[in-house]
Amino acid sequence: MKLNIARQPLVPAFLTLVALTVLAMWKAAPESMSLQESADIPTRGILAIASPEELLGAFQSSYPIWAKWIAGLLMLYTGTCLGRISLRYNLYAAGTCLAIPLFGILGTSLGLGNSLLVSLVAMTLLALAVKNYARAFRNGYAFDAMFRASLYLGILPLVRPASLPLILLLPLSVLLFHRTLRETVVALAGLLLPLLAFCYINWGAGGDFLAPLTLAANAFTSGSPLEAIRAIPLPGLIPLAVILLINLTAILFFLADSYSAGNRPRAILFFQIGLLLLIIPTLLNPVAKPAAVNLLAVPSALLFPFLFVRIHRIAASILYLLLLAGSIFMILLQ
């Protein structure tokens, strides 16, 4: 029996993700930096309450073991969620669970950073947004799917403020998935709800209602947009460059053969390309930190298999094993 990595079944795919998760959580340093240093936008006493990002950092600092367990479970859930998307919508015209281990490989290769819990929560929110936007491509109304996806997308900047450019996924989903004006209004309500709720809670605690917005505006308009890229050490730039190169190759393969897929798989994969492009302003803004680069694992885990199933079996196996070995090396290097 010939082993075909590109058409990997569920059991070995999930076991690979489990092994990488256990290794990553074992090697992860439980101690995070001080909240003022690790947060994308430190509140510095300006807000009456701590931001969700700071609350997650405080929880990790106070309960490092629990933080590792929660982060590990989120990693398993997110990888399984992405694998289910690829299977449910038959994205590659071939049955494969390759997206499951690829998420673990890419997430650990890019590094989870000191803010372990923030990184995993952010990736999970992004994956859930992708999952629900994909559900919105259907006949008839998709109010529930659009609202849920936009709600997750609206929570994401509160957890990882550098991800604010990703809110453009909402208009992208409306265009690609042919949603109506009424569905767009519902989606916009879901997007704004988390931010307005945070402003209201801050106001109720004695702060200014617009203080979170003012703080974010000041943070995004000051500082260097290249700070995050400059702060990534050389060992972290190598896997980033490799992943971007493979993504580019996968996109070229997809564009050359896009009409071999159905309407829904094609729209979902174009959505992943749009998400991949929006990662660029996510990394190139003044509030970004090097750990924000791991958001790249979500669209990459769904784009890579398109390349794997279309190249020769031996080449796919070699590339997969090299990525897996690189992931293990990056984990042990922490």
Image (spheres, rainbow, N blue to C red):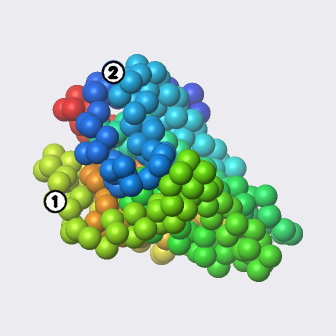
Q: Nearer the viewer, residue 324 or 312?
A: 324
Image: 238 above or below 30: below
Mark in the foreground, 1 or 2:
1
Circle nearer the N terminus (1, 2): 2
Bin the neighbour count of mark 1 within 10 Å (Cα to Cα): few under 14, some 14-19, many 20 and up: few
* Left or right: 221 in relation to 87: left
* Residue drawn where x is 46% and y is 21% of the image: 66
* Residue drawn where x is 31% and y is 61% of the image: 287
* Left or right: 119 in relation to 155: left
**Residue 298: percent from the left, percent from the top?**
47, 52
SS at mark 1 in the image: helix
Pick out the residue farthest to the left. 234
Q: Nearer the viewer, residue 205 or 123?
A: 205
Q: How many marks?
A: 2
Image: 13 above or below 301: above
Quarter of the figure with the C terminus: top left
Residue 152 picture quarter:
bottom right
* Amino acid of disc 1: Arg
Image: 204 above or below 220: above
Q: CA distance from mark 1 to mark 2?
A: 28 Å
Q: Nearer the viewer, residue 29 or 271?
A: 29
**Residue 29: percent from the left, percent from the top?**
27, 27
Identify the mark at residue 230; answer none if there is no mark. 1
* Amino acid of disc 2: Trp
* Residue drawn where x is 17% and y is 54% of the image: 231
Identify the mark at residue 26; answer none if there is no mark. 2
